[in-house]
Amino acid sequence: LELNKKGFNLARRTITKYRKKLNIPSSRNR
């Protein structure tokens, strides 16, 4: 479970980085 949580955090971080790179607003601003 801990490893899964770490992976999830990493994925979210990567997505956030990608969104910033592509200048895509977060899903909250959709």
Image (cartoon, grey):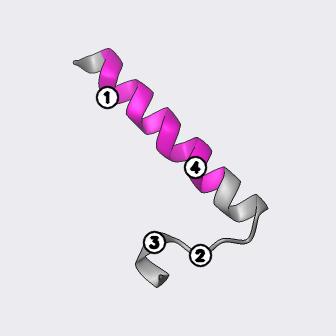
- State the image coordinates of residue 10 (x, y, percent, origin top left): 51, 34
Disc number placed over residue 27 in the picture, else none: 3
Residue furthest out toward the left: 1
Magenta segment's dominant SS is helix
- Disc 3 versus disc 1: nearer the observer: 3
Q: Quadrant of residue 22?
A: bottom right
**C-beta proximity under 8 Å, tags 4 and 1:** no
**C-beta proximity under 8 Å, tags 2 and 4:** no
Residue type, mark 1 in image: Lys
Q: Which residue is mark 1?
A: 5
Q: Quadrant of residue 25?
A: bottom right
Query: What segment carries the magenta color?
Result: 3-17
- Disc 1 versus disc 2: nearer the observer: 2
- State the image coordinates of residue 4 (x, y, percent, origin top left): 32, 22
Q: Earlier in the sequence, mark 1 or mark 2?
A: 1
Residue type, mark 4 in image: Ile
Disc number placed over residue 25 in the picture, else none: 2
Q: Which residue is mark 4?
A: 15
Question: Callout 2: 10 Å neighbours few (<14), some, many (20+)?
Answer: few
Q: Earlier in the sequence, mark 2 or mark 4?
A: 4
CA gap, disc 3 to disc 1? 21 Å
CA gap, disc 3 to disc 4? 11 Å
Q: Earlier in the sequence, mark 4 or mark 1?
A: 1
